[in-house]
Image: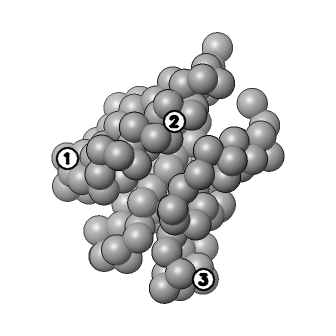
Amino acid sequence: MSLEVLIAVLNDDTANEITAILEKSDYETYLSINEDVESGGLRKAYRYQPDICIVDIKTAQQRDWYLIKELRVISSKMPIIVIIDDDIDLSVAEQMGATHFIKSPITNTSIEVLFNNLGK
């Protein structure tokens, strides 16, 4: 059985890049691309109950923090990986429930190393 990953990101390029990397390693992916938090990422998280979530908070808008906080309500143990830029306050993301971070721009290596560290 493969692990399921919800990818809640801002654009198609990021989603496609992450999906291609993960699907090569037999992860099943669900996408929420630039959708409203409740109708997109959060609804899909409740529907699919993913094992891991990747959230793009490069804009650090309130909706991004809300999504992380609500994902933590769904599962207290689920890894929540946050894609960040240099100007994001990591302590706020951690307080909301983020467990891992990837610096933007994303590389194949950064995704592969992180997922190898998470274990399969």
Q: Quadrant of the C terminus?
A: top right
Of 38 and 36, the residue lying toward us: 36
| Residue 80 visible, this orientation | no
What amino acid type is highlighted by mark number 3? Ser
Q: Nearer the viewer, residue 103 or 93?
A: 103
Q: Mark yes or no: residue 25 visible.
A: yes
Q: Give the percent coordinates (x, y) of residue 70.
A: 41, 58
Q: Residue at x 69, y 47 (%)?
A: 109
Contact, CB < 8 Å: mark 2 with mark 1? no
Q: Position of residue 57 (x, y in %)?
A: 41, 67
Mark 3 lies on a secondary structure that is helix
Residue at the disc numbered 1? 39
Q: CA distance from mark 1 to mark 3?
A: 27 Å
What amino acid is at disc 1?
Ser
Upstream in sequence: badge 2 or badge 1? 2
Depicted 118 relative to depicted 21: above or below: below
Label 2: which secondary element: strand
